[in-house]
Amino acid sequence: MPTEIAWHASHEELPPDRLLELAVRAEQAGFDGVHSSDHLAPWFPDGESGHAWSWLGAAMARTHVPFGVVTAPGQRYHPVVHAQAIATLARLFPGRLTVSLGSGEATNEHVTGDPWPEKPARNARLATCAGLFRDLLAGETVDCDDPVVHRGRLYSLPDQPPRLFAAAMTPETAAEVAGWADGLITVGSDPDAVRRVVDAFREHGGDSLPVHLQVHVAWAADDEAAQRLAVMRWPVNALPPAQTQDLETPEEVARAVAGVDPATILSTMVASADLDRHVTRLAELCEIGLERLVVHQVGPDQAEFIDVFAQHVLPRLR
């Protein structure tokens, strides 16, 4: 079983003030941690997009549990400014922050006007930025040609740098990032598919490193409502990562999912009122060997979800 079961704060769906209150509620209800997305733009035009780093400072000040965040360095965020945000949170909240680095999505990065690189180039940039972060968090002065860094240095450092995980959605990326990451975070609810990603990471150098998993779920009072929630609020789950990563605007994402069969969406997560179904699937995923399981309830009905899962699901998983 995982040592931590975290609630996911989805900035794409809810405004930051609401997420702040929900993070406090999740801790009080019994969740072991909180996990945050980092989006400049939502997936869909009617979504939200609070600034993750501002929110993390507020949320961590109001709680005591560990936090995680998935973030993409090198385009929207300059590496030195990005590392400064990480260092400040790690200094303020020692030992509570895990930062997972990903290659990014065009919806969040295109605003710079720079060309959107192909996946191999993004993975190379990711590895470079991870190395820059480590040097900066160690107090070193760094220079780099791509991305451009000129005599970058941080002056307020944490006593202990946070762990730098890698985010990977495919076995190929998981194998590539195993060489530099302190751990892996991936996303999925199909145990076989998740295991392939995790196995690739472990077989290429990450065998002794921790793994976190984010799982999308849709729970409601009855099955029809849960399925409707999944189809209406998280159809993006049915698109392959290679496609979603290259779409630039929420409007483009909405057009891409317009023709997706609802059955395809429902096949990507457990959408049910039956808590036994949720427990069974989450327990099966835990058997892969996870340090942290991040549960993402899609849609606006977070408070009741937090209370019900904390009372009826978390104890059974533990």
Image: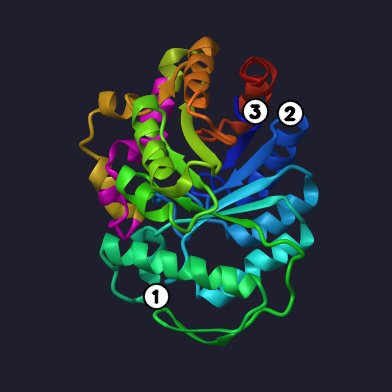
Q: Element type at marker 2?
A: loop
Q: Element type at marker 1?
A: helix
- The amino acid marked with disc number 3 is Ile
Q: Quadrant of the N terminus?
A: top right
User: Which of the two discs, 3 and 1, labels the residue nearer the N terminus?
Assistant: 1
Residue 90, position as x, y percentages in the image: 71, 61
The residue under label 2 is 30
When asked about the image quadrant of residue 146, the answer is bottom left
Main SS of the magenta part reads: helix
User: Is residue 78 rendered magenta in the image?
Assistant: no
User: Which of the two discs, 2 and 1, labels the residue nearer the N terminus?
Assistant: 2
Residue 38, position as x, y percentages in the image: 52, 55
Residue at image position (39%, 51%) is 45
Residue bounds of the magenta highlight: 227-249
In the picture, the disc for residue 112 is: 1
Residue at image position (39%, 33%) is 194
- The amino acid marked with disc number 2 is Gly
Q: Classify 10 Å Cα crowding around label 1: few (below 14), some (14-19), many (20 and above).
A: few
> Farthest residue in the left direction?
259
Residue 39, position as x, y percentages in the image: 48, 56
CA distance for labels 2 and 3: 9 Å
Q: Classify 10 Å Cα crowding around label 2: few (below 14), some (14-19), many (20 and above).
A: some
- The amino acid marked with disc number 1 is Thr
Examine the rendering and report whether any part of residue 138 can be seen. yes
Relative to 243, is 151 above or below?
Answer: below
Residue at image position (56%, 45%) is 14
User: Is residue 232 rendered magenta in the image?
Assistant: yes
